[in-house]
Amino acid sequence: MNQPQFSPRRRWLILAGWVLVALAALPFAARVNQELDAGVRLKGSESSRVEAALQQLFESPFAKIALLRITAAPDPRTPAGEALLKQVIDTIRATSGVRGILSYLDRQDSLFLGEDGSPILIVGLNAPKRTEDAVMSKLGQLTETLRVQLSPKYPGIAFGWTGEAAVNADLRRISARETRAAEWRVLPLTLVLLLIAFRSLISAVLPILCGALTVVVALGAVAVVNRVWPSSLIVVSIVSMVGLGLSIDYALLIVSRYRDGLEQGLSRPEALVQAAKHGGRTVLVSGSAVAIGFAAMLMVRVSEIRSIGMGGLLVTTVAVLVASTLLPVLLAWIGPWIDAGALGFARKPASPRHWRRWAHWVMRHPLRVLAVAGIPLVLLAAQATHLRIDLPRGRWLPDSAESVRVLHEIDGAGRGSFGEIIQVILYLPPGITVQDEAGWRAASKLARYFARDPRIQHVWAVTTLNTVPLGGPELLNRLPDSQRRSLVSADGRAVLLALLPHKDIAAPDAVRLVREIRAANLDALTGIPGARVDVGGLPGFNADYEDAIKNALGPVIVSVICATILVLSLWFRSVLIPVKAVALNLLSVAAAYGAVAIVFQHGLGARLVGLPSPMHGGFPILPIVVFCIVFGLSMDYEVFIVSRIADGRRAGLGDGAALVEGLASTGRVITFAAFIMVMIFGAFVFGDFVLIKILGFALGVAVFLDATVIRMAVGPALIRLAGRWNWWPGG
């Protein structure tokens, strides 16, 4: 494949095209955090059916809620406290986007009071998804104005908002801040490493420019796609991490090929054509391997994982295009200035001679290399069996978010876990309604069954609102229509029961409770055949979330492995090379899982990554995301090395000589590329988002092990042992 020389006209067209793309993407990228959804959606799940039913079958003002806690205020059971609470409620109720308020004034229930007497209000919202942030901001301003007005009379009074909308708004702000901070932490260090690698300012700046352009364009594309395909906030961190790492890696490879050509005596146009041809080909294959992993995530029903897959595909595509189109143009223009800003004080890195000496040693002692390098790696990978993927216990949302602190305060001071409310919808069989004796008894029996469970603090249902013992369906006529319709559907066949778990129940325990309710014998619990329930709320969603990922994990792994083997087989015309690459990638992924289990679950070195104590659990998303990303990124260095070895074989070198030349020519590039990528991932380890912290750690460990132990020792030793069979049947 001959690459055309870049004519001046073509250079200008390519440069102008990228400038226009960058300018168009910049405004979208600047506000991407404000537009993405911090929540997670799971269409077609049982919990999503409950969410839809709350909006369609019931007239509940509390389908979407926010929680407000007032501290340092008089107890609502006193006249002063009652007057203050009424003033607050009247002010909030007049705000657009607020549908209803439930407090101690409506039901003299201690559940609406903290253990210190502080009021807890449930505020129903009816704002569209895209305007929830604006509504929460307006409510925050209202309560801040109230605080200023009331503080002379009640010193220390404070208002704290929480709930899904408030937490999502805070997470968006924190995510934007932490992503920017991580990028600013890593870019100076990356520049230093590139200066050491190239000993030239111009050569070092080029990869950073490519990385910055890739991230900006990819984030702009994510913001545009979000208009038609709503995406999750986590994609911003993934795009920034992967985009910087991939783009700098690809630029490092092509710039190195160009400089190698110059050192071999080629003219600058010849060196550019060689870099664009061989380097561009390697980048294309590597990008295809990375894209396979991200594309597989689109198979998962969880919006969060699909968003990562979409963002990963976009950023990988942009990184490949930047490296294969814009970078050669810049190199052609820079020409003799490629070594401008040469740093005489920079220490010369390891020369090809040192890598050649190592390659010869591997050739002479392949079994010894496998034993010394492979056994510790296998032992680390064995720790992956201890990796837990259920929800973590304790606090894992960032405490720097005010809404998260308020949620923890409510859970600590309240009499139940308001963040883990379980919504159960009882569907009575045809011909039976809650207005009938049979339907009323069924709903009553189910409510009493839940109330007897020691894990449930309180049950809200239409049958628990009355104070008349043994009351029947005639009590429905005494309820206000708005109250009745918030708990009973118009046709009387659907009844809502809201379960408030005990304050000490953890998220995994609430999920277990949901699974028990779903598996229960409903005919026995209600006394009528044909009744069914849908269970939702956050615990119901968490159960559906775990199931969706577990069900998708196997098909995703198989599809990624098969697609990767197919692509590499076609490219290298070999059977053994792709199989070996996949096996080593699986070992790299398992080692990353093992490292996560040791640090984050066993607690060995947890404080070094900013975790005060071990996590008793993990995240369901972790295995599938780490597998798909690591599998693609690890293939980067395999493609780099094997492509060079294959080039040597095409040039007529023997197997051993091609192996030596392949290691000698790629060792330095891979070393610096890996260090840079590890630094980029490591920059995200020290933020407040625990999930991003774990992902950054897992990806960094995987890349480090892959670029050192696997690709420089285990992989070459296996290639040496296989000999000419590496290239069978292609030859």
Image (cartoon, rainbow, N blue to C red):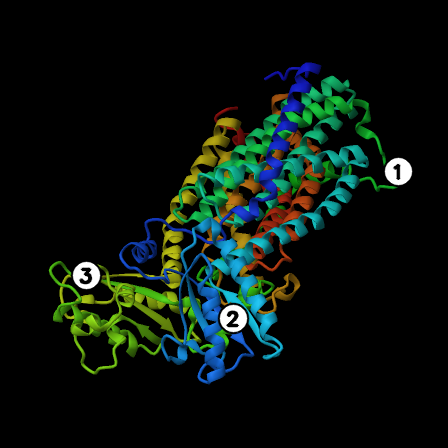
Q: Which of marks 3 and 1 is nearer the N terminus?
A: 1
Answer with left or right where residue 16 lies relative to residue 572.
right
According to the image, label 1 marks what residue? Answer: 344
State the residue in front, 135 or 355.
135
Image quadrant in which you'd find residue 501: bottom left
Residue 450 x %, y %? 28, 74
State the residue in front, 538 or 2.
538
State the residue in front, 436 or 173.
436
Image quadrant in which you'd find residue 458: bottom left
Residue 282 x %, y %? 60, 29
Asked if the residue at tag 2 contacts the one at tag 1, i.e. Cβ–Cβ closer than 8 Å, the answer is: no
Q: Earlier in the sequence, mark 2 or mark 3?
A: 2
Cα distance in 3D space between marks 2 and 3: 37 Å
Q: What element carries label 1?
A: loop
According to the image, label 3 marks what residue? Answer: 493
Q: Which of marks 1 and 2 is nearer the N terminus?
A: 1
Of the two numbered discs 2 and 3 in the rendering, the one whose residue sits closer to the viewer: 3
According to the image, label 2 marks what residue? Answer: 408
Cα distance in 3D space between marks 3 and 1: 82 Å
Q: Quadrant of the N terminus?
A: top right
Answer with left or right where residue 338 lies relative to residue 117.
right
Of the two numbered discs 3 and 1 in the rendering, the one whose residue sits closer to the viewer: 3
